[in-house]
Amino acid sequence: MNYETLALPNREKSSVFLKTYLISKNSFNPERKRPLVLIVPGGGYEHFGEREQEPVAVKMNALGFHAAILHYSLAPMRFPDALCDVANAVALIRQNAEDWTVDSSKIILCGFSAGGHLAASLGCFWNKPFLKTYVPHTSEEIRPNYLCLCYPVVTADEQFCHKGSIKNVIGSIPENEAAEICASLGHASMRDVVSIEKNITSDFPPTFIWHTLKDEAVPAKNTLLLANALYETGIECEYHLFNRGKHALALANEESAKADGSHIEKECALWPDLFKNWFEGV
């Protein structure tokens, strides 16, 4: 296994970096290229959920994927700071694909909660003109090929949104910049810009989603709205809505459980295998 921590280019913050978990080459098939899962942990755009990091990377390695973990910009910030970070991370992975034996056509963003919102945001905006103002890469260099969204924040609808995440991701963007971005996307407000379900086009990546009906922090309506938008647009999608389980389950097993034994749900713990089966069939 090869571990490395890499600062993202074009970012001054030392807190923005990529940590790799790359499966070592083997002698019997040294040129084998693997898909890579870029893990985007949640935390409301104000901290990072530790249980949504290394345990997930190790699990993805066990399933045959290279993995990496992204630490992106947190509040206080302004849109699209975090979006630029994930775009730069995807470009960095593609630039190193040959050395890392990564299949550059199989880069998967795996986002949890607010990290799911960030992953889905790049799915929406990777080829939008406004992003080229902020990111020094071509659209194809920052394109995510697939998404795996785990109880993601999706909507800015006042009735169903995770208020902290929406407030933090918009941040302190100047009014003139906000107006330009809104105009370029045909939206009236930044809340529309950060509502994923309002920005789904035919260029959105194939997507695997899971959530729980009893999520107390991010209502299941978030992923219902997203799944419906994907269905209406004809995007390849698999959606699992489990009956039981609180928010931030991570792997939902002993490997990502809290010290008190909470955040274990055997039903939900099937999601990594369900994701792999879906991915291999897309």
Image (spheres, grey):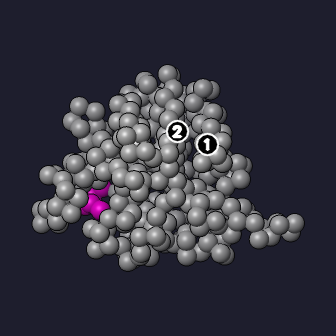
Residue, disc 2: 238
Residue 217 picture quarter? top left
The residue range painted magenta reads 75-80
Q: Is residue 168 magenta?
A: no
Disc 2 is placed on an element classified as strand
Along the viewing direction, whichever of 200 and 18 lies nearer the viewer: 200
Question: If the image is split into quadrants, where does the N terminus sit?
Answer: bottom right
For label 1, count other residues whose C-alpha is less than 10 Å away and answer few (under 14), some (14-19) or many (20+).
Answer: some
Q: Is residue 78 magenta?
A: yes
Q: Is residue 102 visible?
A: yes
Q: Is residue 172 visible?
A: no
Give residue 60's position: percent from left, percent from top: 65, 50
Disc 1 is placed on an element classified as helix
What's the residue type where badge 2 is placed? Glu
* Labelled pair 1, 2 in contact (Cβ < 8 Å): yes
Q: Earlier in the sequence, mark 1 or mark 2?
A: 2
Give residue 99's position: percent from left, percent from top: 66, 76
Q: Is residue 133 left or right of residue 61?
A: left
